[in-house]
Image (tube, rainbow, N blue to C red):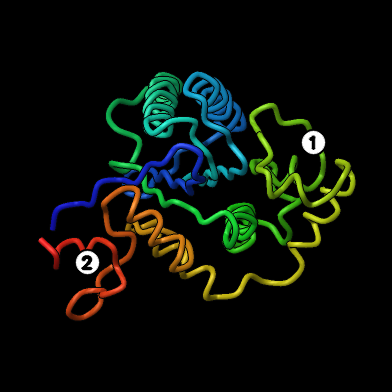
Amino acid sequence: MARLPRLYLPGCAQHVVQRGNNRDACFYDEADYKAYLTFLKDSAAKYQVAIHAFVLMTNHVHLLVTPGDAQGVGRMMQAQGRKYVQYFNYTYDRTGTLWEGRYKSTLVDADNYMLTVYRYIELNPVRARMVSHASEYPWSSYQGNALGKPIQLLTPHTLYSRLGKTDVERQSAYRALFRGKMPERDLVAIRESTNKGWVLGDDRFKAQIEAKTGRRSAPLGRGGDRKSVAFLKTENQ
């Protein structure tokens, strides 16, 4: 089955996942994490992509971003990926690929899922049982979003900014979001939409994306999804 083209919309948030080839480690040392974040910051600035949240795991990376134009995310990932591979291969005297093919991504319905994806990303080390709380992991945006650590890479999303009138209020409200576990339905929705390239959002948001892009935003049901804009266009041809 041919892969669906990625969905890109300027100003629409995306959840991006980049994995190591064969799930091998992409980071061995503290310097590796720092190098990746430096390259990411430079590439994001060059291609006008706002980074809202991130986590660097041992063998993969999660990002929550908003591009300024349709090509921004792709160009950013290509540029920083190339620089990091060069750095990594030189540092560890290796050759060949580091990343597992194409990165994966999904458009995010900000009104319904933005802060949920923030949580999903920054709770990765907890779900992996690397730490007991997100605050204990040094290589995620939780350090900035929740604890106020200066991270030049980060640009707060509008919904994050609305959590409070001051930095202290926003950080306190943000920390409160991390009480308890995430609902399983949210974990499944985020994983499936990202891995399969579907849209993460409610039916209205999905219909809007289909109308703007002409591409299906969700898998067809039996006999076709009759609420799908793409399906209706096919039927009318």
Judging depth in this view, the residue of 220 and 207 nearest the camera is 207
Res. 90 image quadrant: top left
Judging depth in this view, the residue of 231 and 96 nearest the camera is 231
| Chain-order first, disc 1 or disc 2 | 1
Judging depth in this view, the residue of 171 and 69 nearest the camera is 69
Pointer 2 residue: 232
- Distance from the alpha carbon under mark 1 to that under mark 2: 49 Å
Q: Please, what is the three-letter code of the amino acid marked with disc 1?
A: Lys
Considering the image in quadrants, where does the C terminus appear? Answer: bottom left
| Element under disc 1 | loop
Q: Is 129 situated above or below 40?
A: below
Q: In percent of the image, x 26 and y 51: which residue is there?
A: 214
Q: Is 110 situated above or below 66?
A: below
Pointer 1 residue: 149
Q: Which mark is residue 97?
A: none
**Percent position of residue 109, x then y:** 52, 56
**Percent position of residue 185, x then y:** 52, 75
